[in-house]
Amino acid sequence: MSEMDRAPSKVAVVRCDSYDRDKVTSAVREGIELLGGFDCLFADAVPGWERLGKDAEILLKPNLLSRAAPEKAVTTHPEVFRAVGELLHEAGYSNLAYGDSPGNPAFGMTKVAEASGIKGVAEELGIREGDFEHGTEVKYPEGKVAKHFVLCDEVVKVTGADGSAPAGVVVNVCKMKTHQLTRITGAVKNTFGCVYSIN
């Protein structure tokens, strides 16, 4: 498929002037509704979504770069993570996990998630910690620079990156911030955290 054949990306921009729980939930809800709702988004993203339906595995991928409190604006804010998790539950999705491969693997994801407030929210909502502590080599022969990657096992399982059928979808819950190499950190840069031990 060429770039010209691809459908244009859907984008929704909703103003939210604080991390107040109700305001964040309202803004995230409005954004998801403007995009057609989770069911529509997932059906567009995953071939054969109908066979997965509400039993699909949903991997929430926050930005868990380093051990930092929410007010440092380094990681995804826990209220944004909470809003996405609650709205997924409300939409009937209960098979949820979360994870990221932190910038400093020595800290480990659990400690980073705890410092950021994400771990506490995940426990409240019954969202399990995904396996980002192990990796699987995935071949990519079409690559120009890299012909293979080592992806975190949770990502491989959910996406079917190893050639198996996808079990679900990754929901990118990124943190918008500046970045020396890519100028901004958003959804594309946040995806680097799917690579084992690298962010």
Image: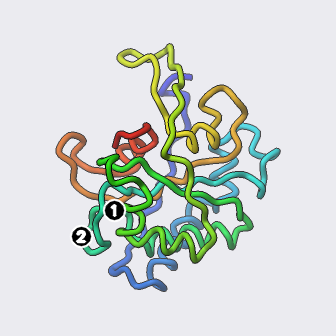
**Of helix, strand and loop, which one carries label 1?**
loop
Q: For residue 166, which quarter of the picture?
A: top right
Q: Is residue 180 left or right of residue 18?
A: left
**How are the residues colored?**
rainbow
Q: Position of residue 52 (x, y in %)?
A: 78, 48
**Of helix, strand and loop, which one carries label 2?**
helix
Q: Determine whether 4 is above or below 100 in the image.
A: above
Q: Position of residue 168 (x, y in %)?
A: 68, 47
Q: Nearer the viewer, residue 20 or 4?
A: 20
Q: Determine whether 35 is above or below 197 in the image.
A: below
Q: For residue 39, which quarter of the picture?
A: bottom right
Pointer 1 residue: 75
Q: Residue furthest front?
A: 106
Q: Quadrant of the N terminus?
A: top right
Which residue is found at the position 45% from the left and 68% from the top? Answer: 118
Q: Quadrant of the C terminus?
A: top left
Which residue is found at the position 27% from the left and 67% from the top? Answer: 73
> Gap in Å between the C-alphas at discs 2 and 1?
8 Å
Pointer 2 residue: 72
Assess disc 1: are there few (<14), some (14-19) or many (≥20) residues with their C-alpha within 10 Å of its C-alpha. many
Q: Position of residue 89 (x, y in %)?
A: 67, 70
Q: Is residue 148 left or right of residue 90?
A: left
Q: Nearer the viewer, residue 161 or 69?
A: 69
Q: Position of residue 40 (x, y in %)?
A: 68, 54
Which kind of residue does numbered mark 2 sit on? Lys
Q: Which mark is residue 86?
A: none
Q: Determine whether 21 is above or below 41 in the image.
A: below
Q: Nearer the viewer, residue 156 or 14?
A: 156
Which kind of residue does numbered mark 1 sit on? Thr
Callout 2–callout 1 Cβ contact below 8 Å: yes
